[in-house]
Amino acid sequence: MNQIVLTTACLLIASTLLFAQQANIDTADQRDLLTAVQESVSSPSDQSTDYAPLNNVPFFPGGQQALQTYLNDLNPSNADQHEGTVHIQFRVMPTGHLTEIKVVRSTESMLNKVAMQAVVRMPRWYPAHRSGLAVSSLYILPITFRAR
């Protein structure tokens, strides 16, 4: 019985000292500590699976043929005399939304705006999966324009 009382008293003193030490940390240190903890909690899961293989790559609803049909319909009248390929990179989020959209390679600068607008207006994609869970992934889409 004395051991239980003694152990409880020691734990109470230790927790009081720990609480007192935490109260002395100034707010800047607390913000830095909170930021470090948040990064360590969110980063390892993202980084550890970046190199694990995907079960499937993200894809346009309806598949490759539906994507080709969608892209064939986007040639604007003012781009009729221009030919070239624009490579657009974007991230397909687990929800299927497209983010981080940017041109990574282009042969005709006038077509960049048209290609960007086409990707921004796209419907949600089906996301990539890893171990049965939807994950975000980068995708590079080449869009080819031909003169009519």
Image (cartoon, grey):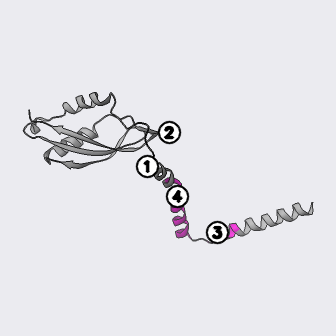
Disc with the residue nearer the chain's start (2 vs 1): 1
For badge 4, the amino acid type reads: Ser
Disc 3 on helix, strand or loop? helix
Calculate the distance from the C-alpha at mark 3 to the C-alpha at mark 4.
23 Å
Q: Label 1 neighbourhood size at 10 Å, few (<14), some (14-19), many (20+)? A: few
Q: Label 3 neighbourhood size at 10 Å, few (<14), some (14-19), many (20+)? A: few
Residue sitting at x 23%, y 28%: 69
For badge 2, the amino acid type reads: Ser
Q: Position of residue 100 (x, y in %)?
A: 33, 48
Residue sitting at x 11%, y 40%: 83
Q: Main secondary structure of the magenta part?
A: helix
Residue on which the image places disc 4? 40
The quadrant where residue 85 appears: top left
Calculate the distance from the C-alpha at mark 3 to the C-alpha at mark 1.
41 Å
Q: Which residues are magenta?
A: 18-42
Residue sitting at x 73%, y 67%: 16
The quadrant where residue 13 appears: bottom right
Calculate the distance from the C-alpha at mark 3 to the C-alpha at mark 2.
42 Å
Residue lying furthest right in this view?
1
Disc 4 on helix, strand or loop? helix
Residue on which the image places disc 3? 23
Q: Quadrant of the C terminus?
A: top left
Calculate the distance from the C-alpha at mark 2 to the C-alpha at mark 1.
13 Å
Q: Position of residue 33 (x, y in %)?
A: 54, 65
